[in-house]
Image (cartoon, helix red, strand yellow):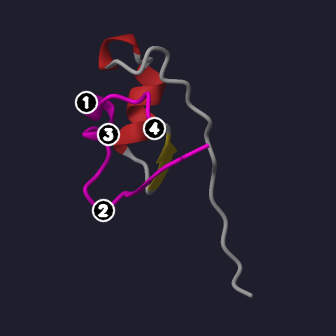
Amino acid sequence: MTDSSGKVYLVGAGTGRIEHLTLQAHQLLTQAEVLIYDALVGDALLELTPSACLKSISRQ
């Protein structure tokens, strides 16, 4: 087993629109390595993530 560490953040996107995003949430999205999101998140929010960010939509 490898020894890895990291951080997990739960970020509420409010209405899913970029205009309602907090500054801290914006910063976290621009630095994300992995993003799990739901269908309510707008495309503009997803575009904030780095191109290498692994993105997955939650179907639940």
Does the residue at mark 3 contact the one at mark 2 (Cβ under 8 Å)? no
Question: Residue drawn at (44%, 57%), measured in percent from left and top?
Answer: 33
Start and end of the magenta stretch? 39-60
Q: Residue 28 shows which numbered tag? A: 4
Q: Main secondary structure of the magenta part?
A: loop
Give the left or right position of residue 10, taking residue 25 as reference. right
Camera-nearest label, 3 or 2 = 3
Q: In the rendered image of this protein, does residue 15 appear above or below residue 31?
A: above
User: Which callout, 1 or 4, points at the residue further toward the start of the chain?
Assistant: 4
* First along the sequence among labels 3 and 2: 3
Residue at mark 3: 46
Residue 49 on the magenta span: yes
For disc 2, the marked residue is 52
Q: Callout 4, which amino acid?
A: Leu
SS of the residue at dot 4? helix
Q: Residue at x 74, y 88 (%)?
A: 1
Using the image, determine if residue 1 lies above or below residue 37: below
Spot occupied by residue 41 in the image (x, y as percentages of width and height): 40, 30
In percent of width and height, residue 57 lies at: 46, 48
Residue tagged 1: 44
Neighbourhood count class around disc 4 (C-alpha, 10 Å): few under 14, some 14–19, many 20 upward: some
Give the amino acid type for the residue marked by disc 1 in the picture: Ala
Q: Looking at the image, do the residues carrying marks 1 and 3 touch, with CB atoms under 8 Å apart?
A: yes
Q: Position of residue 6 (x, y in %)?
A: 63, 59
Disc 3 marks a residue whose amino acid type is Leu
Q: Measuring 45% from the left and 38% from the top, which residue is drawn there?
A: 28
Under tag 2, what secondary structure?
loop
Which numbered disc covers residue 54?
none
Judge whether 23 appears above or below 10 on screen: above
The numbered mark, 4 or 2, whose residue comes first in the sequence reads 4
